[in-house]
Image (cartoon, rainbow, N blue to C red):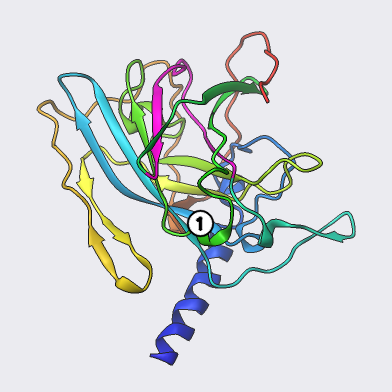
Amino acid sequence: MARSAMFAAALAVVLMAVASEASYLTGTKFPFEGCVQNTQFSPYYATLVSYSENAVKQTSQICLQLHVAPTCTTGMRDGKPTRCCNTHINKLKLFPAFDCRGSVASATIANKTVTSVYWEEHDGFDIVKITPLMEWLSSPAAVDNKVICLNLRAPCWTMAMLSFDKEVLEYALYDKKVNDYECCPVGLFDVTYEPFKGTLTSGSTGGVDIAPAVRPASPKPSPSPKQAPKPSPSPSPQKGGKSKSPKPAPSPKNRSPKPSRG
C-alpha cells in the first residue's frame, strides 16, 4: 500500500511537469496574463469527467473535477516565493471560439448554481470566466474532488463549437486576488464529439460512477464556420487532456479592443 502511494505521488509530479507549459505548447498564450501558469508550482488541476448533449434543445453540459496533487514545488517570482502552493481557487477561465459570447448559460458547483459568468477580451481574443468560487473552494481540502458543470446553449452549444481549438479546450484555475492574481495553473481537456460518463474520484472511498450521459439524436456538429482552419498538431501526453507541438500563435479577430471586466 505504501509503495502504491509513493508511485501515485511520483506519477502526479510527472503529470504536472508534462502539463506545465500547456498553453505555450498550443501556441495561443492563453490566458494572456502574467500569472504563474506552470502547474509544477501549483497543486491544482482538473479532469473532464462527463459530457452530455440535448440535440433537440441545442444544449449540453461539460463536467470537470478539480484535484489537488500530493506535492507542490514552491516557485519564485521577482526573488520571492509565490503563494501558489498554499492558496485556493476563486475562478475558472476557458478559451472559447470567436462569436460564442453568451454560450455558457450557467455553472453548478456543490449542487449550487453559479450565474456569475463573464466574457472579456484579451489581445483580440475572447475569454470566459466563472467567478467567484471561493465560497466553495476556500482551501485545498475544499477544492479536492469538487465537480464544476458548465451548461452550454446556442450559439456554441457543444464542446466542439465552444473550444477555440477543435481538439482541446484550454482552461486556467485562478487563485484569490491579493496584489493582483498571482496563480493561474493551466491545462487542457480533449474535445469530445460523443457524450460519455466518467468516474468521479471520491478520496479514500474509491470511484463513484456518475449518471450516464444522454446521446444526441443528431450527428456530431461541425466546427464553427467562422473559426479559421489551422494545421492539426501532433498529440503528446498531457494531464487533464493532451498537449501539442508548438505552432504559430493564432491571429486575433479584427475588431476594436474592449476593456476587461474584473
Looking at the image, which residue sits at the far right?
79
| 75 with respect to 147 (left or right) | right
Residue 128 place in picture, x, y as percent? 53, 28
Residue type, numbered disc 1? Ala
Looking at the image, which residue sits at the far left?
217
Q: Give the residue displayed 61% in from the left and 52% down from the top.
A: 88
Q: Give the residue displayed 42% in from the left and 15% down from the top.
A: 226
**Magenta region includes residue 180:** no
Q: Is residue 257 above or below residue 172?
A: above
Quadrant housing the N terminus: bottom left
Provide the residue span drawn in magenta.
90-110
Say which residue label 1 marks. 142
Residue 29 place in picture, x, y as percent? 63, 38
Q: Is residue 7 above or below residue 152?
A: below
Residue 230 place in picture, x, y as percent? 46, 31
Quadrant housing the C terminus: top right
- Locate residue 261: give its quadrant: top right
SS type, badge 1: helix
- Locate residue 35: give its quadrant: top right
Residue 174 place in picture, x, y as percent? 62, 44
| 217 with respect to 81 (left or right) | left
Q: Give the residue displayed 69% in from the left and 57% down from the top.
A: 84
Q: Residues within 10 Å of mark 1 (few under 14, many from 20)?
A: some
Q: Nearer the viewer, residue 166 or 178?
A: 178
